[in-house]
Image: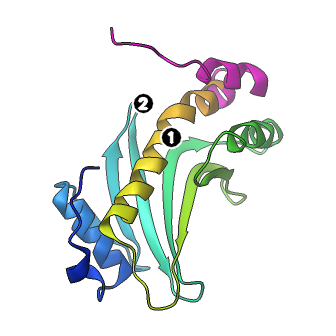
Amino acid sequence: MDTQPDDDVLLALDPLEVVEHVLAAENLTFDRTEDGDLAFALTGDWKDYELWFAWRPEADCLQLCLSLDLRASKTKRPVAYELLSMINQRVWLGHFEVWTDDGEVVFRHALALPSGERPTMAQAASMIDAAVEAADRFYPAFDFLLHGAKTPDEAMAACMFETVGQA
């Protein structure tokens, strides 16, 4: 995201209003959910991702979640957890998890803010960039594991190459 911050204007705003400014600057459509979260979609390398920000005032924490729209069945969860541990070692910001209720694979990232502080537009944009970058990098591994009948090692190997140049 190439948002140019005007942070002096935004410091007094609700943290999710700061994110709204980032999304509006990028001409992205967003909605507030019934829970007050901020939901939007972004196109990645592999698919369109659904993302949502939530403000947790009790923890002074801005949280971002990105759904890969993949689900691990109860029988696939042990190998999904094995793949998660391999992937999370390679993720610097945020982490992947499989939700226990429905097996959804999500990426989560959080920004802790001192009491009364608000994120900058650059910080919010950076969170979005980190989420999409991680999803694009590791989506194939989850897909190979859950739909391609690969082992965690095989799924991981399939996404660990670095592309050089352009075709």
Magenta run includes residue 146: yes
Element at badge 2?
A: loop
Q: Residue at x 34, y 12 (%)?
A: 166
Q: Please name the amino acid that badge 1 sits on.
A: Ala
Please name the residue shown 73% across and 19% down the image: 154
Q: In this view of the protein, can residue 151 be seen by the observer?
A: no
Up/down of 156 relative to 77, above or below: above
Using residue 129 as the reference point, say whether residue 84 is left or right of it.
Answer: right
Position of 9 with respect to 99 (left or right) is left
Q: What distance separates the C-alpha of mark 2 from that of mark 1?
A: 9 Å
Q: Is residue 58 magenta?
A: no
User: Residue furthest toward the top?
Assistant: 167
Whether pointer 2 and pointer 1 mark residues with C-beta atoms closer than 8 Å, the reply is yes
Please tell me how crowded label 1 is: few (under 14), some (14-19), or many (20+) other residues with Cα within 10 Å: many
Based on the displayed image, in which of its 4 quarters is residue 80 positioned? Answer: top right
Q: Range of the magenta residues?
A: 145-167
Residue in the image at 48% along x and 53% along y? 66
> Could you say which is closer to the camera, residue 163 or residue 49?
163
Q: What residue is rendered at 62% in x and 28% in y?
A: 141
What residue is shown with label 2? 46
- Is residue 44 placed above or below 2 in the rendered structure? above
Q: In this rendered view, identify the residue nearer to me: 152 or 113.
A: 113
Q: Tell which tag, 2 or 1, sits nearer the viewer.
A: 1
Find residue 122 and report its horizontal and vertical position in percent.
33, 62
Residue 148: x and y, percent?
64, 20
Question: By what rule are the colours in the image chosen?
Answer: rainbow
Q: x and y percent of residue 144 in the render?
A: 63, 24
- SS at circle 1: helix
Give the amino acid type for the residue marked by disc 2 in the picture. Trp
Give the answer, above or below, for where 88 lies relative to 66: above
* Residue situated furthest front in the rendering: 8
